[in-house]
Amino acid sequence: MSGSHSRQIDLALQGGGSHGAITWGVLDRLLEDERIEIDGISGTSAGAMNAVVLADGLESGGREGAREALKSFWRSVSDAARFSPIQRSPWDWLTGNFSLDYSPSYLFFNTLTQLIPPAQLNPLGINPLRNLVERQVDFQRVNATRKVKVFVTATSVRTGRPRIFRQPDLSLDTVMASACLPFMFDAVEIDGDAYWDGGYSGNPALYPLVDDQGCRDLVVVQINPVERNKLPGTAREILNRINEITFNSSLIKELRSIHLLQQLIDAEGLTLESYRAMRLHLIHAERKVEQLSASSKLNSEWRFLKELHAEGYACADRWLERNFQAIGERSTFDLDELFRDAFRPVDPPAAAKPERGDAP
């Protein structure tokens, strides 16, 4: 797969429900470019699904096989969603709004999930997405491939810590554990431990890729907004923003750790070359995701998914045009800029004036 002019990258893929179609678009563009070789992928939730679908398609049919596998997967997601009771409201259909915030069925279901545990709400454990992944992905091929390394993150319910699953131990259960939203589905049991969505502890986990010495260029594909210029006003907007912050916090902490370590290496002249040489990059459809409500993560209409795919494809195309020459040379993701406000100096308090009668 590698050529004389190819450049290797690792990919870190966030989760985010149907917004993972943005990542599909990014992957589609990267696979189209034969100058790019994907060495490893760390994925969580929808990112984990994108990762295993890509690995399966890559092993069975090369680049074009991976592109077709991703398209087939997301088309199947959309087809399955046609039978879901959760649909947009008539007004949203008329106005072209893909949010579900005003959908009576969504609001009713969302309220139920806050009041009734999954074991009672869904006693048969029906999960159409599980059946879909089982049909779409050959995990024997994923575990056997040497074309790309895959890491999948899930969160231990018992400890709250992330667990990283990798070849040859990837399975339907590990991927579904990575995507297990606790208000909707029972925890997935693996090796006697229960797991929830990996986004709570690693969205996505970076350290498997940082520790891997095979590639030093790490591209984070981010689909959850870090910043929002508009402050949340309604109770729903507040809850959605809390969820965004929660699902970004593990990524921010890992980036901060890398940043601090690189600063320490530079300041002290340490010889931790694996961290000194780590080059970070970011592909983020920030303008698009800022316009999307959290409820649209449950909207899998084909028209919406194609729109998200097109946005991801365009973002990756722009990133390649601007930054391809930097791969293997330098970072294009400025961590100094990201954390510029983290430790903003605080002005010292003004000196207290002496009370009357105090000594000057």
Image: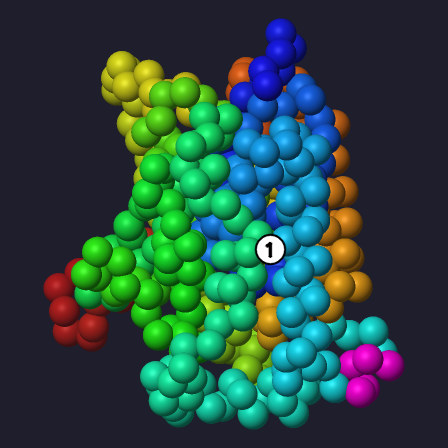
Looking at the rendered image, the quarter that the C terminus falls into is bottom left
Magenta stretch holds residue 257: no
Residue 272 picture quarter: top left
Q: Is 344 drawn above or below residue 215 in the view shown?
A: below
The residue depicted at 56 percent of the width and 92 percent of the height is 108
Q: Which residues are magenta?
A: 90-94
Q: Position of residue 310 (x, y in %)?
A: 77, 49
User: Could you say which is closer to the camera, residue 173 or residue 206?
Assistant: 173
> In the image, is residue 93 part of the stretch drawn in magenta?
yes
Q: Which residue is mark 1?
A: 20
Residue 343 or residue 256, whichever sits in front: 256
Q: Is residue 30 left or right of residue 267?
A: right
* Side (left or right) of 141 relative to 94: left
- Reply above or below: 129 against 71: below
Magenta span: predominant SS is helix
Picture coordinates of residue 45, whole percent (x, y): 47, 57
